[in-house]
Image (cartoon, grey):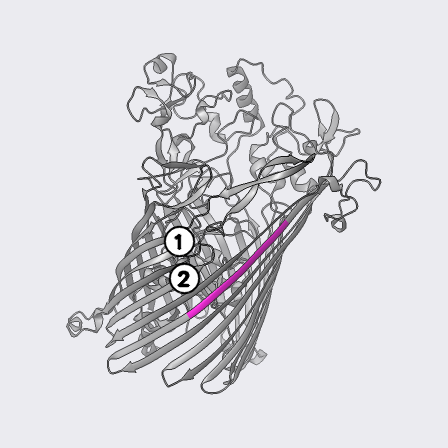
Amino acid sequence: MIAAIYLFAGYQELSAQTKDSLKEKQIEEVVMIGYGTAKKRDLTGSIAKVGGDVVADKPNANPINALQGQVAGLSVVNSGQPGSQADVRIRGTVTINQTQPVYIVDGVFANNIDFLNPSDIESMEVLKDPSSLAIFGNRGANGAIIVTTKRAKSGKTTINLSSSIGVKSLDNRPDLVGAEGFKTLYNEDLANQGLPAYNLFNLFNADTNWIDTIKKEGGIINQNNLTISNGTDKNKVSFSFGYQTEDGSIKYEKFDRLTMKFNDDVKISDKVRAGFGITGSYSKLPQLRSFSSALNATPVVAPINLTPGDYFGLYNSLPQQIGAAQIGNPLAVVEGMRNTQYNKDFQFNPNAYFEFDFLKNFTFRSNYFVTYRNGTGRGYTPVFDVYVAESNSSTPYSGNLLTGINQFENRDVTFQQNQLLTYKNKFGAHDLTLMAGFETINREYSSMSGSAKGSLSNPLGQIPNNPRFWYLHSDFVDSTTKVVNTSAYKQRQASYFGRMLYSFNNKYMVNASVRNDGSSQLAPGNRFDWFWSVGGAWEISKENFMSEVPFINYLKIKGSYGDLGNQYTPYSYFGYPIYVEGGTGVFNGNLYPAFVKAYEEATDLKWEHLKSYEFGFESMMISRKLSFDATYYNKKTEGLLNYVIGNPNYFMNAGSIEAKGFEFVLGWKDRISQDFTYSINGNLTTTETKVLNTLEDGYKVFYGPAIYKEGLPVGAFYGYIVDGLYQSYADILGSPASTIGDVAPGDFKYRDVNGDGKITPDDRTIIGDPTPDFTYGFSVGADYKGFFLNADFYGVYGNEIFRNWGNGNSFAPFNYREERLERWTGAGTSNWEPRSYTASAYNRENSTYMIEDGSFFRIRNVQLGYNFNKGLIEGLGIQALKVYFNVQNLKTWDHVNGFTPEFGGSATEFGVNNSGYPNPRITSFGINVTF
């Protein structure tokens, strides 16, 4: 279940007489609807518009991150790791494939918007309903986010400079035991196994907090932007440049990005227009690390050996009996392998259009887009020694004797063009807009990756720790160790589409869209499919009888139904045989690879179809100070695209998933005096998901701790219900017998769900739902004589998180969660934390013990600033000047043992706490000046 709450508070010099006209403008605002624009008042669907100012002054490299809590029905789960992608879902999960919405940036389709500078964004529209999404055909099922970037406006030349600098700090962190707690629990574990206590704690007597050891103290995020624009009636030109640098929460994580944007719009004549633009970005991606080893490594080891002697200054190995083979010294990983991976990303997106009006009511527009993305990387595996205290000797870290290198490059090129014919006319009480279009999209992707090692026999020596030599063709490389992989695919799509927007007497509206998509990914003869929608709305407040209800200023009821498509799968060729290596054969004494089909080609496969409808109302009351919107939505995907394991594997359309819920949006905006304005806004969204049917009766698939099964929520966690702990052998004898492992006092007492008198795998059941019952948010804002204060709050309620760390394991002693200090040590000492015993996997079965309450509340953002009065700055040649202080992720209250309570994932496995990565608190100061 999903929800959000959005607040906008702005300061404008408005007289009391112009206040009502502003409210009317909000109803008349123009929004992007895909291949065009429309007045929001004339639409029958649900489109939420977010202004560029909402994302421009927030410390986020990816503008989508700033939308968390801003739009009802939009779920944004941020990672916090520099350069990472957020998990974005609109109105729930309704597929077993990709869940991300489609992005449209100035008309071109994109997989994400990480190449955009937030300061370049004019507005972002979130499209949620079938009426607005059907125009995107087989890309519309997951929703859409339309991004419009800034362009020059008529007027004199303006120069805008903005800069901000922020400092990161950790809000929450996992609770782990210290050295004494570890010694107690570990020796108790050994005793319960009948083994002697560990006798080398005299060598390992430190008390190391590994999180503090590898975290980055005071990481910096710095954003700088320059925009120059000039516009006349004939020509409008703008250019922008941005530079951002960001430290991660772990040492030596560094993200750098340059962005640029250029637009030139030319009015050739009163009826002919043309334009050209370029958007580009160049990023140096961080060498990403994880806190996983810091959570698992025993605290009794010091990071570095400080004992005088031959091995002074080496990183310490973990104890040989306590994880040395499985867990590396976390600091050795971070420092010993720092700056050994150089990844770069380059994106270049030129676009052009030509547009002309003819026959009074017609407009023809021709658009051309190119998206070029190139990712490259080179990496190095160093060799260095660590100190082994038990033998007072050194050994190569991770047993690695040879240096190594890796290299990759991937290239993704897409050419998109569309031809649009629009007819607009008003005649009498009728207002009609018709649009017809044709579009093609050609995409080509290729990648190469390889690795190699050095050699001890190479006369040049091992591969040096110098990027000059990190190439597969380097003379330091042992050619016999080279491994190279390549891949490539092509995708083609041709589409025909149309849309009608009709209004009668500005009271009765009808919207309809249709699209026919053809795709090369499907088999010949089955490539084209139809998608459509229809919607209606009635602005009741314009009826004469509503004059008797004076406090209602605006009321519109609306509804829509549509059939949308989902083409997002990890495969590109369903109708042709694809061969992969499946063995070897010997011919004439030589060994050759043998190839088998990766999967059986499918001649009748179709894209998933989403049947969706919604109905609701929009309203404004009390002199348009109060607004209230409510919507019910229902989405059902049919013909899910299944990849079925068999002999051979094959694809099949089967099964359906439903998501449904409500959205509520409430707002209040008012002006107390000429100098003071304030606003309070919020929304709440619920979503309930359910797998209606699957491939066949009884079919189920496990995705980690989650299960895909008929009748259960999407991504439901599956396991045993814990009813406490066995307190004695008498308790065990009086309980259902376990068939899944031997038990003893202090072990979990699993529930006999099916009542057959024993504990078997059939007693597993749903133990959690990662989708919240509802997500909510609210914002408040006030402005007084140029001083402004805005605060955003965000939270979720009713979801479960599956904790996938700190549950113990049998192959290596990991560190313990702090809760383990409350473990069972005798009858009555605990009824939840089991005894310290890792020799059996019984207590590690997926169960409610691993389930955490995912509900949380967060102060998402607080900003205090001042807009200087023009009279104070115009003498300096400055048009506008704003300074502000901002705190993002000020505080989060949650019930999860980890850095964050938020965890994204795939369509079928999400909400899994794998130790996570912090969403840091960022305290920043910024300035924005326009000349």
Disc ID at residue 329: none
Q: Is residue 654 above or below residue 722?
A: below
In the rendered structure, which amino acid carries the disc numbered 2? Asp
Residue farthest front in this picture: 588
Q: Is residue 529 left or right of residue 229?
A: left
Q: Quadrant location of residue 924?
A: bottom right
Q: Is residue 8 visible?
A: no
Q: Is residue 408 above or below residue 370?
A: above
Q: Quadrant location of residue 745?
A: top left
Q: CA distance from mark 1 to mark 2?
A: 10 Å
In the rendered structure, which amino acid carries the disc numbered 1? Trp
Q: Is residue 104 visible?
A: yes
Secondary structure beneath label 2: strand
Disc ID at residue 517: 2
Across and down, in percent, residue 530 comes to 35, 61
Magenta segment range? 438-448
Across and down, in percent, residue 789 comes to 44, 62
* Helix, strand or loop: magenta stretch: strand
User: Residue beneath label 1, please?
Assistant: 607
Q: How many marks?
A: 2
